Image (cartoon, rainbow, N blue to C red):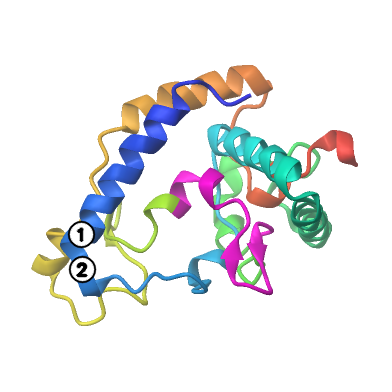
Amino acid sequence: MVPASDTRLVQIVDAAVAEAARRAGAWVKCAPGCTQCCIGVFSISQLDTARLRAGLERLAESDRGRADAVRERAQDSRARLAAKFPGDARSGILDPARAEEFEDFGNEESCPALDPQTGLCDLYAARPMTCRVFGLPLRTEDGLGVCELCFQGASAEELKTCVVDPEGDEMEAVTNAEAERSSGLHGETIVAWALVTPCLD
């Protein structure tokens, strides 16, 4: 179940991204059909998981065929990745002690939510936080992270003026803790496991 506060959290993050994109203007190359950020697995929270599952349920109500295709892609992805999953392959919980393995894990794997025919995300409204902020400059432990297709030729000063600065970090942590309590799962996973629950095995 998606915590009620997630709606407000998404609004805060989306507003911060929209403002950063406005400041960035033509530096941002993100557009429908660009799938650069949809290739390669990445970790997501239990809050992201709850949001994705709710999004898949809504899609099933409006377009059963597309929802079934997402589920099938998720099951296929999970089958390909299970043997080398750096964590508990049953629950899908990643092991933080195996972070080095995760760096080289599933780098060529397409996100199951990506429609390979259209190049669009079938669960766009329910996408994880990482997807919501990708492309624009973000503060990381290593400095500013940015999509390699965006901001080509931009100076460090130009990047700094376009940093996404959502003020929802604390709210996200609290809301994720609520999602973890609700699901009984603690820790991060990946999209393929988020969309294929153990009961579907």
Q: CA distance from mark 1 to mark 2?
A: 5 Å
Can residue 113 be seen in the rendering of this structure?
yes
The quadrant holding residue 65 is bottom right
Quick check: 46 left or right of 53? left
- Foreground residue, 194 or 119? 119
Q: Which residues are the magenta region?
A: 111-131
- Foreground residue, 127 or 155? 127
Q: Position of residue 187 (x, y in %)?
A: 58, 33
Can residue 88 be seen in the rendering of this structure?
no
Q: Residue at x 76, y 36 (%)?
A: 91
Q: Position of residue 96 (x, y in %)?
A: 56, 42
Residue farthest bottom in this picture: 153
Q: Is residue 48 magenta?
A: no
- Per the image, label 1 sits on a secondary structure element best described as helix
Q: Is residue 135 above or below residue 123?
A: below
Residue farthest right in this picture: 201
In the rendered structure, find residue 22 and report the number of the disc placed on it: 1
In the rendered structure, find residue 25 and report the number of the disc placed on it: 2
Q: Position of residue 184 (x, y in %)?
A: 68, 20
The three-letter amino acid code for the residue at tag 1 is Arg
